[in-house]
Amino acid sequence: MRLMPIPASQPGQNPARVPEGGAAVAPASVLPAWDLADLYSGPDSEQIETDFEGAAAAARAFESAHAGKLAAMSGDALAAAIAEYERIEEVLGRLMSYAQLLFAGDSNNPRLGQFYQTASERVTAISSNLLFFTLELNRIDEAVLDEKFADPALARYRPWLSDLRVFRPHQLSDQLEKLLHEKEVTGRSAWSRLFDETIAGLRVPLEGEELTVSAALNKLSDRDRPTREAAARAIGDVFGKHNRLFALITNTLAKDKEIADTWRQYPRPTSYRNRANMVEDEVVDALVTAVRADYPRLSHRYYALKARWLGLPKLQHWDRNAPLPEDDDVLIGFPQARDRVLSSYRAFSPELAEIGARFFDRPWIDAEPRPGKSGGAFAHPTIPSAHPYILMNYHGRARDVMTLAHELGHGVHQVLAGGQGYLMAGTPLTLAETASVFGEMLTFRAMLDSETNPTRRRIMLAGKVEDILNTVVRQVAFYQFETLVHDERRGGEILPERLGEIWLQVQSESLGPAIEFTPEYSAFWSYVPHFIHTPFYVYAYAFGDCLVNALYSVFQTGHPGFERKYLDMLRAGGSKRHKELLAPFGLDASDPGFWKRGLDVVSDFIDELEGAS
């Protein structure tokens, strides 16, 4: 099944944004909380046990009825088998979605941690009876399968089967696949849970308070520079004290991945992720090369500009997300944020806004920061027969408005793609960011265009540049960090100090000479959950941002039928790959000029900022 990582990383298929920035928390009384009753009424619900038992019986019957018989089936019979497989998977998806969301809401609660682990183990055991199905499908000869596609019922599943067969060369024997599948709950999943619970339980002592990691990271964009410095040093100290544990988790999971990659004959550590994203290694290489080559005209140039604005010879790492001197840092209430986002969506597409409004009109959003809750933000797709849920930690800053616009984009995308069914609704990570980043851009442009005050406009533009740098430059640097770590791990265990050295190396390269790093920053690698839950996930952020920048530039030219084509792209879910989806807009991600077009948008913003200085 699509067993989703625990929410501290990215439940479902979408990224959890882990910002280093925030402000005073918006009043809790105006912040919405989600109601998960559309999945189950509670963790003690009788329906949960009914669904577990029903899915287990159905999975056993499915294996008994179909194992060893797929190649001989007619196209119609095979389509019926896939439909039954999808039905069982969706039941398991409902169970796991509920367990993940409960755990995301309060990972400090041991009962919810126990419920999550128990659900994971039971779902894994049940899905062991289904594992034969995809393995056996991949053993069907290509010519035989092509004949079966003549049946329209099976042709509907062609995209899913095509994506499945990408992994055909890397498939192991059925017994090995089953062993690896069943050991997941005591292997990678268990280490991931240890990471999440450790992060959730950490407290950062700062100015007489004991802050969660999320709250402490928010202090890195405080207006007061001594507060930012104190927060940075305190965070570094806390993570430094736990460095051996985080290094052990990282080393263990990197070795675990190396073993699996070797058995499956993946050419390099990133290869599995690229195949899962349905994107060629060469396309990812082109993206990373383009971004790294543009570090000087993007991040290096911007942070030198910011140092001058702040009156500093150089920025310290705790100044990177500092507000500009003229920034009045006015708190934005959640209702106001809602109106800004929905009005921006509505100006582009009334249908987009109507779907987005459902998340606010119904209890589908959890926005209150609280101890034990997952940091950052995500949109969890759950299952097509239910609806997505959004988690965020709303602090009332302009960046939080952008985060709301971002996650709402994910949610709307998931609703539109739901028509594809459970197996084909989910998009590869490289495309999962399309609607979220586009929604952000719509909101930002609307807010920028309505701003007549030059100072406020400059602040908004600088904020957008910083967000894009965090999404593009910083995530490519994260990707470089992972690449270096996984490559070096193949030669033996990496000491915590060496992990810190690699981290400082990629940070210096990406952020440039205008930023200095103090020793405690060497521990900051350890708070990034993506390294633990979804190795090499992070480049999808840069892929999505550059893709949307290129897409938005097409929209600005008045491309005919853009709204219709855009909504069709979202409705396609995972049924099409990036080449098919971008073709109607005249874009091609394999063209080197494609990435330059996206990066030029950021450079143009910085040009405007330099001109206004």
Image (cartoon, rainbow, N blue to C red):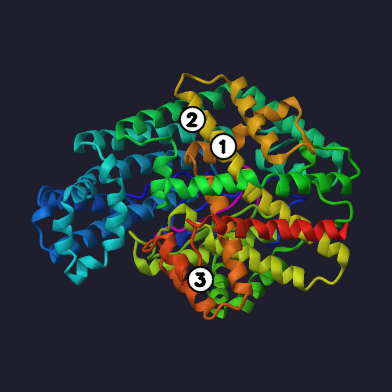
361 in the magenta segment: no
The residue sitting at 73% across, 39% down in the picture is 512
The residue stretch that appears in magenta: 369-383
Helix, strand or loop at mark 1: helix
Q: Position of residue 587 (x, y in %)?
A: 51, 65
Please name whichever residue, 540 or 47, is drawn nearer the observer in this view of the structure. 540
Question: Vertical placement of 183 versus 85: above or below?
Answer: above
Tag in front: 3 or 2: 3
State whether residue 193 appears in this view. yes
Helix, strand or loop at mark 2: helix
Give the total number of marks visible in the rendering. Answer: 3
Q: Residues within 10 Å of mark 1 (few under 14, many from 20)?
A: many
Q: Amino acid at mark 2?
A: His
Label 3 or label 2, whichever comes before in sequence order: 2
Q: Which mark is residue 480?
A: 1
Disc 3 designates what residue?
585
The residues bearing labels 1 and 3 have C-alpha atoms spaced at a distance of 31 Å
The residues bearing labels 3 and 2 have C-alpha atoms spaced at a distance of 37 Å
Image quarter hosting the C terminus: bottom right
Disc 2 designates what residue?
486
Q: Amino acid at mark 1?
A: Gln
Q: Tell me: 342 left or right of 102.
A: right
Label 2 or label 1, whichever comes before in sequence order: 1
Q: Position of residue 423 (x, y in %)?
A: 33, 59
Q: Which mark is residue 133?
A: none
Please name whichever residue, 36 or 606, is drawn nearer the observer in this view of the structure. 606
